[in-house]
Image (spheres, helix red, strand yellow):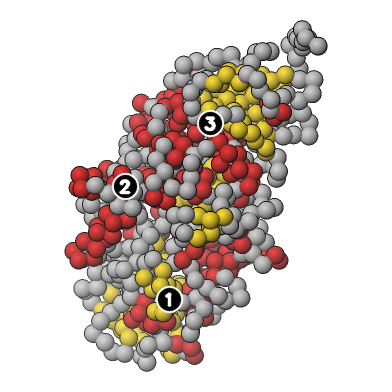
Amino acid sequence: MQRRYPIGAEIVSENETHFRVWAPKANVLEVVLESSADGRAERTLHSLARERDGYFSGTVRCGAGTHYRFRLNGSEDFHPDPASRFQPEGPHGSSSVVDPFAFKWTDANWRGVKLAGQVIYEFHVGTFVPDGTWRAAAEKLELLKSDGITLLEMMPIADFPGRFGWGYDGVDLFAPSHLYGTPEDLRAFIDRAHALGLGVILDVVYNHFGPDGNYLRVYSDDYMNRERENEWGESINFDGKNCGPVREFFITNGRYWIEEFHFDGFRFDATQSIYDKSPEYIVGAVGHAARQAAGKRAIVLIAENETQEPKLVRPRQAGGDDLDAVWNDDWHHSAQVALTGRNEAYYSDYAGRPQEFISAAKYGYLFQGQPYSWQEAPRGYPTRGLPPETFVVFIDNHDQVSNCAFGDRARTQTSPGRYRAMTALLLLGPWTPLLFQGQEFGATTSFCFFSDVGDDKLKEAVRKGRFEFLAQFPSSAGEEIQARIGVPHDPRTFARSKLDWSERERNGSLCYLHRDLLRLRREDSRLSRQIVGGVDGSVLGAESFLLRFSSDQNDDRLLIVNFGRRQRLVPAPEPLLAPPSGLEWELLWSSESARYDGPGTVDLATEEEWILPAEVAFVLRPRPPTKPRKQSKRR
């Protein structure tokens, strides 16, 4: 008999399922078939055969929808499958046999996605739509497609206990959360996305397991490394004693999501906390297996990495891990300071000045080994040679919005003009832009940290830890502010984080802003191209700068951004302001348009001077001169 994966329950013929589990702590292991998912009804027991290296396996007469658990060593306790494909009642309930071939896919011609040209959209299924299900979320996909989104990034869905949560405390890594629907519902969501030309990548958490509902220690103590901790406690054992089956578990998980759900890649959470000194880093190993599983279909692999290690995106032959992209927190931190003026806590090493954005456009990370005062140590490593699309940048994401005391989005913390200008920089720059759910229509709903995990004691520990984290920001540390911060396990905190889709109708100007910018990014002959070394920049003032997108065909573009007051550039001794030889600049796009609730388009340049309106961004392109060049009066 040929299994597809080394672990889990797999249907092998009509009414026959093969079970295989790694359980070195067991001498005897039985499958307990149950007539209901809560495990309270009739049960039948079936012994599995012991293999070498702590595995047990065997075939049992049962089919799709069968509820089951495992019993070890004749115990009176029954436990879910560590590689369960579905937990209908959550992590503490029974596992369910799933037939992955029951769903009829329609995406046979889907060729996947490559990084260049993507516009990423991060979303949390439970708050994206009122119902918080994959079926309901699928109804919004046409809108996202029409906005210009190309790649969806789904926040973690590995099943976790409680009524709501972000998903980063998952414990059943193969089981799509029962809170959002069935595995078939998830497949239908991805199939619909592909039909519309949208890719879907999954945020996976391979740095820790959640604190509640994790039964792995029942089967083996070697899943975790008790001698090496990260910020969540014990780290996962990827390079210690008996790490082989642990590595196999995670590599299989990567293959599984790609093959059985047709995901188009992953975003790996907090890779700086995935400790592994093996010859092949586990993140690279999972990525390699995922690419093999995808076959001819292209996938995108992105890492979050606080320590800013470009090794993750270097090719394998150069000693790297062969991922495609990394999140660029440096860009966000500069943007946040430029928008709000607050450079507290981990924003303290950023000034939000023009040179930071120019350097980000040219080099990606801002810190590549320089001293970093917030951590009292050097930060980052050189990024030389990496293409611009390698760096994913954002104004908002789930972490950064929730790290404001009340979950406020950047839009609500700055002026409309400055926000429009920053949005233009985000969406027209050479990097890969990411929007957070609702940003495309100017959502004002908060997004707070919410978690219903655990008993009262654990809930209180989560609340206390969250409040202590926010207290690193002086603006959030006062007693009055702390008293108003949403309690993570309060259902009202979760409810307030749900998008209000009626804002899409009310915020037409911001809808137009995002749609127009994404169309320009997609269709413009130069801005649509992410060219290595193709961008230069210059500081024009304390809060103003330009980015020059060069071209071999005199098809340059000039993006000028002013976050400050109105400015006259007289004189303007900056070569990057000059049009290509024999041509002159014309206005292609401006954030001043009344379409975006701006004051309207104004003249930006004459033959005598440049005028930069306050809090503006605009794009210029070259054209043949409309009149002879004015001759100088003095010699």
Q: Position of residue 219 (x, y in %)?
A: 37, 82
Question: Image point 67% across, 37% down: which residue?
Answer: 536
Query: Mark 1 is on which residue type?
Result: Arg
Q: Position of residue 8 (x, y in %)?
A: 44, 74
Please tell me which residue lies in front, 213 or 466.
Answer: 466
Q: Is tag 1's residue or tag 2's residue first in the polypeptide sequence?
A: 1
Quadrant in the picture for residue 439:
top left
Question: Image point 29% across, 46% down: which residue?
Answer: 476
Q: Position of residue 345 (x, y in %)?
A: 39, 50
Where is mark 3, residue-wise? 542
Q: Position of residue 261 (x, y in %)?
A: 49, 58
Q: Is residue 380 left or right of residue 153?
A: right
Q: Is residue 521 above or below residue 190?
A: above
Q: Is residue 223 above or below residue 594?
A: below
Query: Element at badge 2?
Result: helix
Q: Is tag 2's residue or tag 3's residue first in the polypeptide sequence?
A: 2
Where is mark 2, residue-wise? 474
Q: Is residue 87 left or right of residue 559?
A: left
Q: Is residue 471 visible?
A: yes
Q: Label 2 neighbourhood size at 10 Å, few (<14), some (14-19), many (20+)?
A: few
Q: Which mark is residue 228?
A: 1
Query: Mark 2 is on which residue type?
Result: Pro
Q: CA distance from mark 1 to mark 3?
A: 46 Å
Query: Element at badge 1?
Result: strand
